[in-house]
Image (cartoon, rainbow, N blue to C red):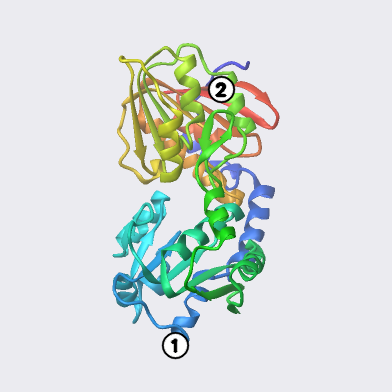
Amino acid sequence: MSGWCGRVKKERLRSSPLAVDECFPLALSARRRQSKKMNADPIQTLLLPFETGEAPMPAPGRGLFLRAEAHPALAYGETAARWKEALIAVQSFKPAFDRLQAAGFDALPAMPDDRDFDVALVRITKHKQETLGLLAQAYAALAPGGRLHVAGAKDEGIESIEKRLKSVLGPVSSVSKYHARAVTIEKQGGPMPDELAAWADAALPRAHVERFVTAPGMFSFDKVDKGSRLLVEHLPKDIKGRVADFGAGWGYLSSAMLGACPYMRRLDLYEAEAMALDCARHNVASNREDLEITFNWADVTAGGMPAKRYDFIVMNPPFHSDKAQQASLGQEFIKAAAKALKPGGRLIMVANLMLPYDRTIAAEFDLHRTLVQADGFKVIEARR
């Protein structure tokens, strides 16, 4: 265990060449990967059949869009008003949901009930099993004769998805443009194909990890990640009072604190993915009458978090495949935690050793130290 380190002056950070790019090779590599993906536009490709007239626009309220995005082609321009009237936009990720609402879409965090849609749009995700579940949901929500439109970038596995759809549903039409591919299928009458029903079932929440309920697509849905496990193994024994779990996911850290921290009086979970938060409600349960637990669907980096409220905040900041975004997002989590802690409050977090969080922590907290370092991760304690 290392000793406490004091706050670094912000002026020094600004004057340091390293402050411009704390991890140059990491950031440069990420920029190169990002530049290769900049021209990929699956949503624009998804809309091509409607722009060319090959597919009719759905009537108001007759279109479904799963994992919807407030793409400029839908939110602005000549046909934007018609799309906003036509689509029920389903998005369980809070930042994307908020963008949809701000753009004027009828947005929901979960699938609507009892609707037969004429058109269903699906933007594939990074997780194949999650994507197959979304396709099954969308197909089931269509009226007979309705059309399923699916799109993804070429490096996201859209061709593999197209093959799976062909094997189950028969001939499809497809188009490639903008470094992406869109596939269209017309729904036939009759019962749901067994394989599609299996896709839907496989995507449902269930006990994938020990006793914990999770679902495909969630972070570390099929095993506890090494960073979170390391953090749990080194939780301070004196965590007490008002406690928050930022980026709580399906509730692993919070569940561990229930057993390890008997002096907590309130535990607030904040998670941006509504489906993960639903799993956390199942996984984080206590019979203690003196402990209040809340589950909050929120993007902690968006502002509006309670200020100077918590005695402790515990977190494993989320990360993306693009490591430049990963670092930025984690830094925003650190800043949000600093604002939410009481004077003297403490942050306990785990981070990948490669991520440049140290300077942000030094700028936001009076004292900080590394509690443990192992398996490519470190657990950090910081005090306001």
The image shows residue 173 at horizontal and vertical percentages of 58, 80
Q: Which residue is mark 1?
A: 53
For residue 343, which quarter of the picture? top left
Determine whether 343 is above or below 154 in the image.
above
Nearest to N terminus: mark 2 or mark 1? 1
Residue found farthest to the bottom? 53
Q: Which is more toward the observer, 141 or 78? A: 141
Alpha carbons under labels 2 and 1: distance apart: 56 Å
Which quadrant does the N terminus fall into? top right
Determine whether 145 is above or below 193 in the image.
below
Which residue sits at x=36%, y=17%?
Answer: 287
Decide if residue 381 is on the left or right side of residue 74.
right
Say which amino acid is labelled 2.
Val
Say which amino acid is labelled 1.
Gly
The image shows residue 179 at horizontal and vertical percentages of 61, 73
Which quadrant does the C terminus fall into? top left
Crowd class of label 1 (few under 14; some 14 to 19; many from 20; radius 10 Å)? few
Q: Which residue is mark 2?
A: 232
